[in-house]
Image (cartoon, grey):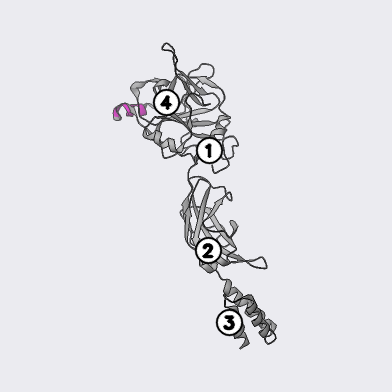
């Protein structure tokens, strides 16, 4: 009888502490201590059991952070002292495979109002698919945790670099640009088959192609912005484009002023290296008001055409003077022009040097360990 009374009192969550204490004092001397201990332990475990978190929601995802929330019962919300979050990259198309599926080793956080922000706990990478599951927990007097079952696994993908991240990258790139050298033409090297195709199938237009995934994984233009890639770097001693190229033995050259002028906007898009001592800077040239310009306006830092460390245009002040064009000397510039370019705007010539395929940057991956070109977020 007394065991039943005690069980009744202990199972009433609404009872005041003094009522429970009174009940215990009445029953204490009538129940063997070992039976009392077992009963209290069992009832306490029953009272603190946690339900499985459900309806997991991910929001406010950036390249290196996200917010996560889920539904809990009011009782669990009141009892939970900690949350366990298990996060891993999605691998092999199996979102249910966790390295430590039954051991909450990834993140232990004190219970806070949901959704909770997750940042700085992992080196999250931009544009990467992740799997996440959660547990709720109650820390007990002995330091152990009473935990719920793992929730269902939810997948999400991190975002691109935000403007603040790109400005950090821009600051690093400025430190590596070097002094400015004059140049007069933009150029593009390709194979003979490419130019033949442009003439016969495209009416002489070099049409924009989708930017590949080379460089920083978080650059907003990767696989999102179309353009025609051009170079403008020159040899230090001659002031002319280099004789060698990794892209092909034929070179299309176009006067710099045809593309870089008062009617174009210049944007910074990336700064990276490929495990080499030299670095690449990716710039975007977009005619003002074009579709490409509208994309860049919301996604990339705008540069002053007349005053930046990478690529400048100083218009002539007198009719008899020529405009001045300069490029950075200590980085390799990759310029993406967002509109079609007609071959008749320039000329196609054969280079006198070698075709060095090993130096191509097509889909090249950025060195994640380089301290010069990485910022304190995902690569």
Q: Nearer the viewer, mark 3 or mark 2?
A: 3
Could you tell me if the residues under marks 3 and 4 are in contact, i.e. CB atoms within 8 Å?
Answer: no
Q: Nearer the viewer, mark 1 or mark 2?
A: 2
Residue 188, label in figure: 4
Q: Nearer the viewer, residue 264 or 354?
A: 264
Q: Residue at x 58, y 42 (%)?
A: 376
Q: Nearer the viewer, mark 1 or mark 3?
A: 3
From the image, tell me which residue sits under label 1: 366
Mark pair 1, 2: CA separation? 36 Å
From the image, tell me which residue sits under label 3: 8
Q: Nearer the viewer, residue 77 or 212?
A: 77
Q: Residues within 10 Å of mark 4 (few under 14, many from 20)?
A: some
First to last magenta residue range: 193-200
Q: Is residue 343 above or below residue 148?
A: above
Mark pair 1, 3: CA separation? 65 Å
Q: Residues within 10 Å of mark 2 (few under 14, many from 20)?
A: many
Q: Is residue 199 magenta?
A: yes
**x and y percent of residue 177 in the render?**
55, 27
From the image, tell me which residue sits under label 2: 150
Examine the image and state in which quarter residue 250 appears. Answer: top left
**x and y percent of residue 335 in the render?**
45, 29
């Amino acid at each position: 009888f007394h065991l039943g009374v005690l069980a009744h009192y202990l199972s009433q969550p609404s009872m005041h502490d003094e009522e429970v204490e009174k009940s215990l004092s009445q029953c204490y001397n009538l129940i063997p201590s070992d039976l009392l201990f077992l009963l209290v332990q069992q009832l306490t475990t029953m009272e603190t059991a946690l339900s499985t978190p459900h309806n997991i929601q991910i929001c406010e995802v950036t390249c290196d952070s996200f917010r996560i929330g889920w539904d809990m019962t009011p009782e669990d919300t009141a009892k939970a002292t900690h949350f366990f979050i298990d996060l891993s990259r999605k691998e092999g198309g199996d979102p249910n495979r966790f390295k430590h599926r039954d051991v909450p080793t990834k993140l232990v956080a004190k219970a806070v109002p949901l959704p909770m922000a997750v940042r700085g706990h992992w080196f999250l990478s931009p544009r990467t698919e992740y799997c996440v599951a959660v547990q709720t927990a109650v820390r007990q007097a002995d330091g152990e945790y009473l935990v719920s079952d793992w929730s269902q696994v939810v997948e999400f993908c991190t975002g691109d670099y935000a403007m603040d991240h790109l400005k950090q990258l821009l600051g690093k790139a400025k430190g590596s640009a070097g002094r400015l050298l004059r140049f007069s033409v933009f150029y593009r090297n390709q194979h003979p088959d490419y130019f033949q195709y442009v003439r016969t199938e495209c009416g002489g237009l070099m049409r924009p192609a989708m930017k590949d995934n080379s460089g920083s994984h978080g650059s907003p233009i990767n696989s999102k912005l179309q353009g025609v890639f051009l170079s403008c770097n020159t040899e230090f001693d001659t002031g002319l484009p280099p004789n060698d190229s990794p892209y092909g033995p034929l070179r299309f050259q176009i006067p710099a002023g045809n593309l870089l002028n008062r009617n174009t906007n210049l944007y910074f898009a990336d700064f990276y290296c490929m495990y080499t001592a030299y670095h690449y800077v990716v710039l975007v040239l977009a005619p003002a008001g074009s579709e490409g310009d509208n994309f860049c306006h919301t996604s990339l830092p705008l540069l002053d055409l007349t005053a930046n460390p990478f690529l400048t245009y100083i218009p002539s002040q007198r009719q008899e003077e020529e405009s001045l064009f300069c490029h950075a000397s200590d980085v390799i510039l990759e310029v993406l022009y967002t509109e079609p370019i007609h071959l008749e705007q320039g000329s196609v010539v054969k280079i006198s040097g070698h075709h060095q395929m090993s130096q191509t940057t097509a889909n090249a991956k950025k060195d994640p360990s380089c301290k010069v070109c990485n910022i304190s977020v995902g690569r």
